[in-house]
């Protein structure tokens, strides 16, 4: 079956077709969860926040001017939600405990220590490089899809992706041998 | 891209697919029936898109547009709108003028203020700085003209020319079939406007906006004008009668075109007093206009005088000076306690037909108590001939002319036979 583009799906959603929104959800939810995870460092919170992002996006879909830029718009909403979450979370923490910001990291989501270290290393990358990694690995390694999602040129995307991988490798190198 | 790190990264991202179906079901179940409709039409959105991409950009653009509209409004309203000139625009024109020509139509008002009689008119010229000329024309006179070649009969001319170091004043008049000239030299030069006809612009320039009101529009000699009116007291606070001054200014620039002074007659009606018209703003005036003209065919009696003024650096009368001002009958009017300061002194020299006359004067600034004493005498209409004495031994005294509201008195010290500088050295001190 031919893959519908975002514009078609958005138009269908605006026409009342919720299933089209489900298709958009399937397409972008992992990416949005990954972005949210960069902030929450907790899968459950990231999942909740991603749900919030999609709910808001649905409510404001009529305000989207250029439907081709749905993915960038969605990333923008997720950034805004992350900021709000962080603000609320920090205030809550302030009243409850004296934990430092780095202690926001909570439970591990994998038994594999190396995977956890890698996940942690990704959160230390600059946002642009993080986004490139998320888009590439969550779009089934499709550079075209990742470029479209991030509204970037291929050459630009490759450059950033390459830089991200190198930086990540360097970060992993700096870890003790048993954690690499 | 199938390096070991790739494999690990794939595993890193697998976690974000966890529970996907359940979460999707939850979301779809909680969605409202319809997403919101676009709040504005697509065309408007396109306009916004053209103006700026993000909400912040749109807000900045909107703020910039609003600021531009406000600036535009402030710039053009009310100052430069079609009839939006304010009194401040008129005053600005007066203060910035470099040369001016106008006709002052003088009307004599009788003591009952019942009706004006045309007395004459002055054609006035002013050129910055401090050069002026007033040609006076009397209506209905049979006297010959000062300037025989002039097309109009002119009975008096006052000219003030100026150099960087001195002012030359020429007063030309017709007296018993001969021209009479008084040439006065002022050093340092006088830059203020000398006569009432000249000073009217200074007075108009001092009227504040809150003392004027707009009275409407009128076309004068084909020029669209806006009128302003002020009470005569705003124009001249000391004037005893009631009245009003009207200034009609060009509506686009604020340049005065017509000035009317009207006084209130006893019955309450306003009668015309003075009209200023034929005003030429920043006209090109030759310096020759402010030099002594050639008086052909007249027997000239020339009086030359000069004025040298010194402003004192020490302004306090010494404590041991028994200064007094008395009336001729000996009644004490002022003493040293009534004098605030001694401001300046001057030597006035007059040369009439080879005879030299020299007068030395000093000017005393009075304090409020001293002024009140002088005003009291003035109000009673008593003889103001007073004698001032700085030194009881020498009996030096001088005539003291006093103006009604003047801040001080001018004292003639010619009989003391000293210069203003010597007066300062011997009678004044810098101490309090």
Image (tube, coloured by chain):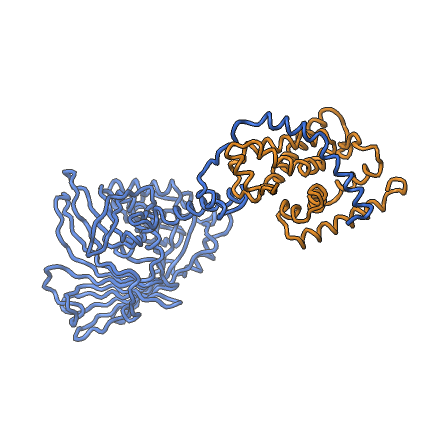
Chain colours: A orange, B blue
Residue at left offset 22%, top offset 64%: B157
Q: Position of residue B357 (x, y in %)?
A: 30, 65
Would you place residue B75 above or below residue A37 in this image? below
The percent coordinates of residue B188 (x first, y second) are 39, 63
Q: How many marks?
A: 0
- Residue B350 makes an appearance in the image: no
Horizontal side of B154 relative to A4 (left or right) equals: left
Which x, y percent locates residue A132? 70, 46
Q: Is residue B9 left or right of residue A155?
A: right
Task: Place residue B335 in its image quadrant.
Answer: top left
Q: Quadrant of residue B334?
A: top left
Q: Residue furthest front?
A: A1
Q: Is residue A151 above or below residue A53?
A: below
- Judge left or right: residue B16 versus residue B113: right
Decide which of B196, B255 is in the foreground and name it: B255
Work out whether residue A97 can be spotted. yes
Instruction: Report the front residue among A124 and B165.
Output: A124
B415 lies above or below B78: below
Q: Nearer the viewer, residue B37 or B280?
A: B37
């Amino acid at each position: 079956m031919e893959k519908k583009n975002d514009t078609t799906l958005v138009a269908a959603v605006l026409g009342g077709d919720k299933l089209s929104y489900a298709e958009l959800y399937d397409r972008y939810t992992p990416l949005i969860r990954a972005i949210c995870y960069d902030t929450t460092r907790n899968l459950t919170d990231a999942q909740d926040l991603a749900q919030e992002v999609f709910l808001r996006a649905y409510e404001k879909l009529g305000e989207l001017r250029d439907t081709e830029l749905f993915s960038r718009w969605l990333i923008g909403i997720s950034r805004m939600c992350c900021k709000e979450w962080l603000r609320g979370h920090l205030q809550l923490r302030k009243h409850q405990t004296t934990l430092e910001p780095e202690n926001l990291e909570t439970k591990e989501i994998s038994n594999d220590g190396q995977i956890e270290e890698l996940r942690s290393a990704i959160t230390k990358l600059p946002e642009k490089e993080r986004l490139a990694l998320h888009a590439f690995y969550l779009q089934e390694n499709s550079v075209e899809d990742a470029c479209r999602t991030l509204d970037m040129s291929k050459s630009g995307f490759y450059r950033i992706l390459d830089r991200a991988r190198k930086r990540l490798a360097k970060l992993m190198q700096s870890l003790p041998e048993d954690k690499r | 891209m199938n390096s070991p790190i790739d494999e690990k990264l794939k595993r890193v991202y697998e976690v974000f697919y966890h529970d996907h179906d359940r979460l999707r079901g939850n979301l779809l179940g909680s969605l409202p029936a319809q997403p919101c409709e676009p709040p504005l039409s697509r065309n408007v959105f396109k306009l916004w898109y053209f103006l700026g991409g993000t909400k912040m950009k749109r807000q900045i653009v909107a703020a910039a547009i609003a600021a531009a509209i406000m600036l535009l409004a402030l710039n053009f309203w009310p100052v430069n709108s079609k009839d939006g000139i304010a009194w401040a625009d008129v005053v600005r024109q007066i203060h910035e003028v470099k040369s001016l020509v106008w006709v002052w139509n003088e009307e004599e008002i009788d003591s009952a203020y019942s009706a004006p009689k045309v007395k004459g008119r002055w054609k006035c010229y002013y050129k910055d700085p401090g050069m002026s000329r007033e040609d006076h024309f009397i209506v209905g006179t049979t006297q010959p003209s000062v300037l025989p070649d002039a097309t109009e009969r002119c009975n008096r001319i006052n000219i003030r020319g100026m150099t960087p170091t001195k002012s030359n004043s020429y007063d030309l008049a017709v007296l018993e079939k001969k021209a009479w000239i008084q040439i006065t030299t002022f050093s340092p030069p006088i830059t203020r406007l000398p006569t009432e006809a000249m000073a009217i612009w200074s007075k108009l320039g001092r009227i504040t906006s809150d003392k004027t009101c707009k009275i409407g529009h009128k076309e004068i000699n084909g020029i669209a004008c806006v009128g302003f009116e002020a009470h005569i007291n705003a124009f001249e606070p000391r004037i005893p009668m009631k009245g009003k001054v009207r200034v009609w200014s060009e509506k686009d620039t604020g340049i005065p075109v017509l000035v009317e002074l009207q006084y209130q007659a006893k019955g309450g009606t306003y009668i015309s007093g003075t009209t200023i018209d034929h005003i030429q703003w920043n006209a090109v005036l030759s310096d020759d206009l402010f030099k002594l003209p050639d008086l052909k065919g007249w027997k000239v009696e020339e009086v030359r005088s000069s004025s040298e003024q010194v402003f004192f650096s020490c302004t306090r009368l010494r404590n041991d000076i028994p200064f007094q001002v008395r009336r001729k009958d000996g009644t004490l009017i002022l003493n040293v306690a009534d004098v605030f300061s001694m401001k300046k002194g001057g030597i006035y020299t007059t040369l009439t037909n080879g005879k030299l006359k020299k007068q030395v004067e000093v000017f005393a600034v009075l304090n409020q108590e001293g002024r009140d004493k002088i005003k009291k005498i003035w109000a009673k209409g008593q003889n103001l001939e007073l004698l001032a004495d700085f030194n009881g031994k020498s009996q030096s005294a001088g005539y003291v002319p006093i103006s009604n509201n003047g801040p001080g008195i001018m004292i003639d010290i010619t009989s003391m036979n000293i210069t203003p500088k010597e007066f300062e050295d011997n009678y004044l001190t810098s101490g309090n």
